[in-house]
Amino acid sequence: MRPIRVPFERVIAPENLRGAWLDFRRGKRSRRSVRAFAVDVHQHLSRLHRLLEANRYQPSGFRLRIIREPKVRLIAAAPVVDRIVHHALYRALAPWVDSSLCDTTYACLPGRGTHRALLKFLWAQRQYRYRLLLDVRHYFLSIRHEVLLGWWARRVRDPRIVELARRIIDSGDGLYHAVVSDGRSPTGFTRVHEALSLAEGFPPPRTGIPIGNLTSQWWANHYLGAFDHFVQRELRIPHYQRYMDDLALFSDDPKELEAARVPIMQWLASERGLRLKHPNASVESTERGVDYLGYHVRRKGVFPLSATLRRFERRVAETTGISADEDVDRVVASFRGVLMFPHSVKGWARPRHVDLPVDFEVLPEEREGTEWSPDSG
């Protein structure tokens, strides 16, 4: 694994910060916070450049929000300035950092993504007789800062970039123990670890990264990069692929998949401090369909889940009469891949018809949430 010699100056260069701003605002130009930043964008970017150059930049807090569909999660949205820094770091380093990933991982990578992963999964369903599906328990919450930073320090030579990454990673320390607004709670507030049904004291200090930031998705994908190489080089499974923390193994020999279970659990525990959500998951025949990445995959094709389509219809119906066109557009865009992907491959199952409303109104641009910063506890 060759070290990356990208200098810190390239990360904070005005042209890179400008490009990061343009990347970040794509699809978000109607949001109130983005519009406010755009009014004096040159002044904001100049000030950010000076802070980074003087080593005085510190990440701010997050806007926390509990969502319950499709499952209960904590979404932590960073301010515009911090997200520009995330994009600047990604723009400058991703081409070199991502080159170390195996071609069997599909999350958060240009030219791959959910649909590529589904196509490969469908191919494996048809190619092999058995599969073993595993996923990591509380993946984002279990990522250890010291392990992540150790990997980053080995890859990147400039200590100033390592320090910037450390500040970003540590900025989320403690947010899973915060108190957030919750309309379903009698008091109007709830503790995050209670909403997520976490054990008291979990995650421990300097463990866990927030869901909702570019760098979190990027680093979480790399956190298991070495695991991909372990499965391919040591276990030599006929076909293996990973989408973030969803692991899929295929073989014509069910005993081969069973034999891989214990080494996988041992590597995850010893190298990353991770546990499987279902360690006793069964080895199944690929003749049976299975839910994967929001779809139901069978040998004859890929089908959107009925629950996903019902959620889409409900989300659109909720915006009818109370949302602006751009708000509804974002709802439709978030489900467009689910609705259109099966249409794009000849012979695949087509989703049932979904009626869309035609009259919309305006919702407040900023979603409800709770402000949180590392200092607020």
Image (tube, rainbow, N blue to C red):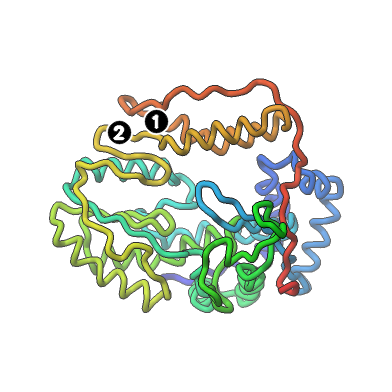
Q: Position of residue 306 (x, y in %)?
A: 42, 35
Q: Does 257 sit left or right of 11 as displayed?
A: left
Q: Nearer the viewer, residue 200 or 118?
A: 200
Secondary element at tag 2: strand
- Vertical relation: 48 (above or below) 366: below
Residue type, mark 1 in image: Pro
Residue positioned 75% across, 68% down in the render: 52
Residue type, mark 2 in image: Gly
Residue 348: tell me if it is visible. yes
Residue 134 is drawn in which quadrant?
A: bottom left
Q: Position of residue 218 (x, y in %)?
A: 53, 59
Q: Position of residue 322 (x, y in %)?
A: 73, 31
Q: Residue furthest front?
A: 186
Q: Which residue does the numbered mark 1 point to in the structure image?
A: 342
Q: Which residue does the numbered mark 2 point to in the structure image?
A: 301
How far apart marks 1 and 2 lie (CA) works out to 8 Å
